[in-house]
Amino acid sequence: MSTKSVAESVTTSGKQTVDLAQQTVRDLNQALHDQNKELTIAEWEVLNPKGEHNLAVGLDQKLKVDIFGPVGYYCAGMNKEADITVHGHAGQGIAENMMSGSVRVKGNASSAAGATAHGGFLVIEGDAGSRCGISMKGIDIVVKGNVGHMSCFMGQAGSLVVCGDAGDALGDSLYEVHIYVKGSVKSLGADCIEKEMRQEHLDELSALLEKAGVDEDPKAFKRYGSARQLYNFKVDNASAY
């Protein structure tokens, strides 16, 4: 179905519905990208995603997009400004390289959620797989469940909040991400250490939990961060690189 057909099927409520049982991913993404130039339809709902990859990628407009069902790889990647909700599970790389806006996953997310993202807000209401927040550069991530191994690997800026447990090698080769974990941590990665939870961190964590709609006591969390021993090459640390 053409992009024109997508635009012509606006409901009387002003909300656009795209049914991927009848229309293609390309139709959907082109119709959403057309809003970058001129905003004519602010609210969108996507039906029957059935694990399709690359849904709602590269948006650059203040859109509200609800996707009803599971999504595949790289959903909501490179997002700017849009608020995207996945009412289901998400495959690898949800909100990868996001710049701003928000993404919420009502189910679980696979590996590399929020990878390399420079900004925006990602909430995962279930569990997240391995490498959650890998190389994150400014995004804030709240996971209501657990995260897998190597989460926040080489994280540079932003915050990762884990309300459950964290797997092996949390924060390996970390820069300046603030990591908060309520549950257990199986092991810390190279140069990641537990740090003092000061009032400024309790304030930051409280704000993140409130924004995510998560009812947790910030005082129940521990903070982790970089020991800053890998910033510059030191021959004594060669085995840790």
Image (cartoon, rainbow, N blue to C red):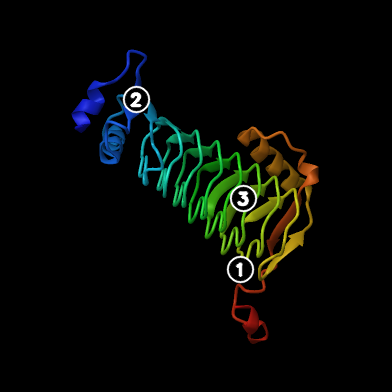
The front one of 215 and 205 is: 215
Tell me which residue sits at (26%, 21%) in the image: 9
Q: Would you call the spot at circle 3 few (<14 residues within 10 Å), some (14-19), or many (20 or more)? A: many
**Precedes in sequence: disc 3 or disc 1:** 3
Using the image, tell me which numbered label, if any, was put on residue 17. Answer: 2
Quadrant where the N terminus sits is top left
Residue 4 rendering spot, x and y as whole percentages: 19, 28
Q: Amino acid at mark 1?
A: Ser
Q: Nearer the viewer, mark 2 or mark 3?
A: 2
Alpha-carbon span between mark 1 and mark 2: 44 Å
Q: Amino acid at mark 2?
A: Thr
Q: Would you call the spot at circle 2 few (<14 residues within 10 Å), some (14-19), or many (20 or more)? A: many
Q: Is residue 38 above or below residue 59?
A: above
Q: Is residue 146 left or right of residue 131?
A: right
**Precedes in sequence: disc 2 or disc 3:** 2
Circle 2 SS class: strand
Quadrant where the C terminus sits is bottom right
Alpha-carbon span between mark 3 and mark 1: 15 Å
Residue 11 rendering spot, x and y as whole percentages: 32, 17
Circle 1 SS class: loop
Q: Amino acid at mark 3?
A: Ser
Check the image and name the residue furthest to the bottom. 235
Q: Is residue 79 left or right of residue 142?
A: left
Using the image, tell me which numbered label, if any, was put on residue 173. Answer: 1
Alpha-carbon span between mark 2 and mark 3: 34 Å
Q: Are marks 1 and 2 in contact (CB under 8 Å)?
A: no
Q: To which residue does mark 3 refer? A: 159
Q: Are marks 3 and 1 in contact (CB under 8 Å)?
A: no
Circle 3 SS class: strand
Image-quadrant location for residue 155: bottom right
